Image (spheres, rainbow, N blue to C red):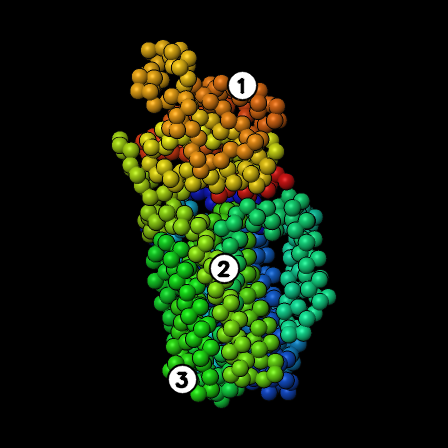
Amino acid sequence: MPSAGDTRTPERISEAGAPRGNPFGARFVAPLYLGASLNPVNSSIIATALVAIAAALHIPVGDTAILISSLYLTSALAQPAAGRLAEEFGPRRIFVAGITLVLVAGIVGSLAHSLTALIVARVLIGAGTSAGYPAAMLLIRRRAEQAGHAAPPREVLGGLSITGAATVAVGPAIGGLLIGGAGWRAAFWINIPVAAVALFLALAGIARDPDPLRLGSPRALASRIDLLGMLGFGGSLTALMIFLDALPRLDWPALAAALVLAATLAGWELRAAQPFLDVRLLVANGALTRTYLRNGLTLMGTYVILYGLTQWLEVARGLSAYQAGLMLMPMGVLTALAARVVSRRAAVRWPLIACAVLLLVGAMATLFVGSGTPIAAVICVTAVFGLTSGAGTVANQTVLYQEAPAAALGTASGLLRTFGYIGSIASAAITGTAFHRGVSDSGLHSIAWVLVAISALVLVMTVLDRQLARADLHHTDQPPAGARNPGPAPSTEPTRAEPTRTEIPRTESRSADMTTGTHTTPALDPARTALLLMDFQPVVLGAVPDPQGVLARAGEALDWARAHGAHVVFVRVALTDKDAAAVPSHNKTFSQAVAAGYLTDGTAATAVHESLKAEEDDLTVRKTRISAFASDTDLRAELRARNVDTLVLAGLSTSGVVLTTLRQAADEDYRLFLLADATADPDPEVHRVLMEKVFPHQAEIISTADLAALSTAAQ
């Protein structure tokens, strides 16, 4: 995925260009919801058509499984690729192009008379529908920033999840109804009217992309979108699918090819200027990577039931396609309801834990389902998985929105879906393995045991993920999507607020690409960069709002420096007896400190906070005045010896050490980055004014979440 240091930024909006009224009105969200639903509905509706297709084409039912896997494989490859293209060429263009391709695919499938033609149609559907979700996520993110929202627009994201998650479960019921009344071709021609409506709504309701279409030379274009990275990703994923599709037979050559291609891809992406799959970011941003894994495993469990139970109902219980689909309707309804409830909550940790618990409960309940189980009991079991699907999809999507770099949200969103499709492909392999000797109760119970293992793993991952709790603290007090974020209110007293991530101000100080008009944040070279953690001491922490929140973000910045090889400098303020004696009475700040005795060196209050652990190669300086350069160590010489020309600043307080050090470092020509969310001041209004009005003229204002992406751009 592209880094946040790219010349492409999530939005370039002046106050005059901000949307008036509700920025997420029906004209804007309707095409996004409809377009994003095309992929999941095509993923699920085909389940009830396989038996009819096999009969019409005079082929074994097992051969029709390729219609499922071909769409999943195409979607798994195309989702992040579409996201990358949306970042590069504009999300509206890619969204419209995808819907147009779905329209064409619906025509091809409706006229097909062979399995090959149907496979072509499904591949086209997979490619076209894959543009919907990542482009929608990027459009929503840009719209939110345009409206001045720092928090995720939860209800809008929830609506996106509801339309996607609900159609997965409702698809079999819709498919059963259509196919029962109009034949198997309905699974393809239904795309024609739906895509036509979506195309009309998109052209009417989504504003044109502001940047002109810029292709450049084929070589430059291939480099910008990392075409080789895309191909390597596709090759490794294809080999993995072949291995999974062959189960229970072990296709060792396919597995070896998948591993070799994956290793080659990782090596290539580590050297790519604009990597399609940002390996360093995935390693450094554990919260994002865990979200991908958690989402893939959860959807694996949901799809195992969706496909496995559908086949079991039709074969073992003798139900028609329509009846089997109808039985899954409660699952779809509860998916939508759960998604709606979770989307209205700012917290994500407890919904994700509840999702994992429900997945485990549903898996264990499936162990007791058999041919003699009452239909009502079977419906109740499917309902549990509906709750799991709705809650998990919305919560994981919100975590992605929070953790992914803004400039890379399109690719990141596509990768979220890719992990979901890998889970879906794996679920097909699990179902095929369990039913390879025939669809039976024992095969269903084998599936249930696999589900028990999957759900237990998801539960452990979720409970142990401390970042989820920190993210909840950061976002629980953010304003809803329907209102402009007014910014912090003036205050003269220190307050303790729930931790929030600081909104990064948009200013005119950033450099501009004269070709595209986009803002550019310079990349970070960790080898030439020093992270200055300034005055994170108990004596100072007690004076600022949200001390634990800002301390946690300082810890995240320290983790980034460790992971990427940046230099670390701890700066603390403390006075020896000699230093105290040298403070003149007219120095208001330090004469008062001397009189009070709270900056005395050697006390616990003046030590660097225990959560920020220094290592042998780190530099710790003790300063006797406000600026970090006024220390007992020649900081300039130490930085020169380490070949440092770039400083990343974080500290307490904004109007004290941060202001003084930043202005002095700017005069000495350091490249400066300021971590807005790892900086605080006793007066929130002073903090806001400095961040928005003063500091952007000397430094790049970023957040801790931007660090990993900015550093990869320099590799």
State which quadrant residue 237 falls in. bottom right
Out of 178 and 355, give the one closest to the viewer: 355
For the question of whether residue 523 can be seen, the reply is no
Which mark, by number, is residue 375?
3
For the question of whether residue 620 can be seen, the reply is yes
Q: Residue at x 30, y 39 (%)?
A: 496
Label 3 crowd (10 A; few <14 / some 14-19 / many >=20)? some
Label 1's element?
loop
**Residue that mark 2 sits on:** 294
Which mark, by number, is residue 634?
1
Q: Is residue 375 above or below residue 128?
A: below
Quadrant that contains the C terminus: top right
The x, y position of residue 396, in whole percent, is 45, 58
Q: Is residue 222 above or below residue 190?
A: above
Out of 73 and 513, give the one closest to the viewer: 73
Out of 410 and 109, give the one closest to the viewer: 410
Label 1 crowd (10 A; few <14 / some 14-19 / many >=20)? few
Q: Is residue 179 above or below residue 562?
A: below
Label 2's element?
helix
The x, y position of residue 203, in whole percent, is 47, 59
Question: Gap in Å between the C-alphas at discs 3 and 2?
Answer: 31 Å
